[in-house]
Amino acid sequence: MLAAGAATVASLLLAQPASALKLKYVQVVNVVEADAVESVEAFCPNGYSVTGGGAFSNGAFNETRMQDSHPVDGPDSDSKPDDGWRASIWNTAASARNSESQAICAKNLATKVKSKSFMPGGIPPQTTCPNGMTVTGGGIETSGTFALPPAIISSRPGDESAGGRVGTWFVNADPAGMSSSQASGYAICVDKSALELNYTAEGFTADNLEQDTGAEVCEPGERVVGLGAATNSNNSALVSIFGIDTTDTDTKLDDGTTATVDNYNASSDIFPEAYSVCVA
């Protein structure tokens, strides 16, 4: 049990106005060699916890795709995956391609990371936050290889209108030979009283046998704390889920989410969505 003074401090941290929340956006660039899968990690500064993150690659159609985009543990005294973000990118191009990991980090914000294993191709999980908590972001981890890459088709907040639940993070992937022990969904949770969150989504079209990109931008005055996307179709793959900067006065990737999708369907368009979890 916390001492009275510690309990008071914790209560004050949770009750802080959203406008007082200190956020940092950490990006780390990597090079993925030809015919390889490589990972890159972005870590939050001391005193910050990860609220969300993303993965980026600059491959053309059917060259690169995400294999992992999820929170990780850093070199601290615990084993909680709340310190940063890992992005793993699969590259089949004849030459190297760039990749990037982004960690969205909040100072003095108490977070709890939940995870849930699942079988790609089966019933996808909704990783649920504990009672009294809601989700700021989430991710997906696979153990795909270069020879058997998964196709990640969803990593997004739960949506009641689509059969989901508020306070959950929904992920899905096509199997490519994977088993039930080879994928996990993550949800990053905060106390409902800590932040006033705004969950938004924007659809776009990915033409057949093409790569397309869409974006969802937070409302003016808001900043993004969690990034998500869904292709809403099999025979497709998420290439990138990353932060976006708009025409504001800074150069931070803090304004919303950009999502890039490869559509492998030969005769039909698909309708992906980019998701942003935003805070004022």
Image (cartoon, grey):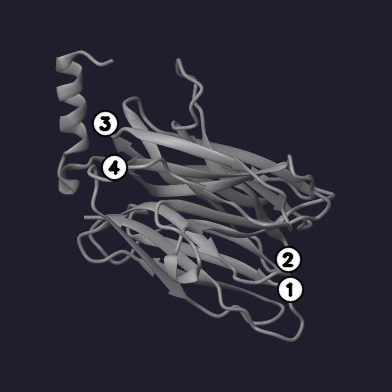
Q: Which of the two labelled residues, at mark 3 and mark 2, occupies the earlier sequence position?
A: 2
> Is label 3 or label 2 in front?
3
Distance from the alpha carbon under mark 4 to that under mark 2: 34 Å
* Of labels 4 and 2, the one closer to you: 4
Mark 4, residue position: 23
Residue reaching furthest bottom? 267
What amino acid does circle 1 point to? Tyr
Mark toward the viewer: 3 or 1: 3
Lower sequence index among marks 3 and 4? 4
Residue position marked by numbered label 1 in the rendering: 264
- Residue under label 2: 62
Q: Where residue 269 sits: x, y (%)?
A: 64, 83
Question: At x 31% / y 32%, what residue is drawn?
Answer: 110
* x 46%, y 63%: residue: 258
Left or right: 230 as drawn, with respect to 178: left
Q: Secondary structure at mark 3?
A: loop
Q: Where on the picture, by quarter, is residue 122?
A: bottom right
Q: Quadrant of the C terminus?
A: bottom left
Asked whether residue 26 is in view, the answer is no
Quote the CA–CA distance across marks 3 and 1.
43 Å
Q: Amino acid at mark 3?
A: Asn
Instruction: Report x, y in % for residue 149.
Output: 77, 52
**Which residue does the numbered mark 3 point to in the structure image?**
108
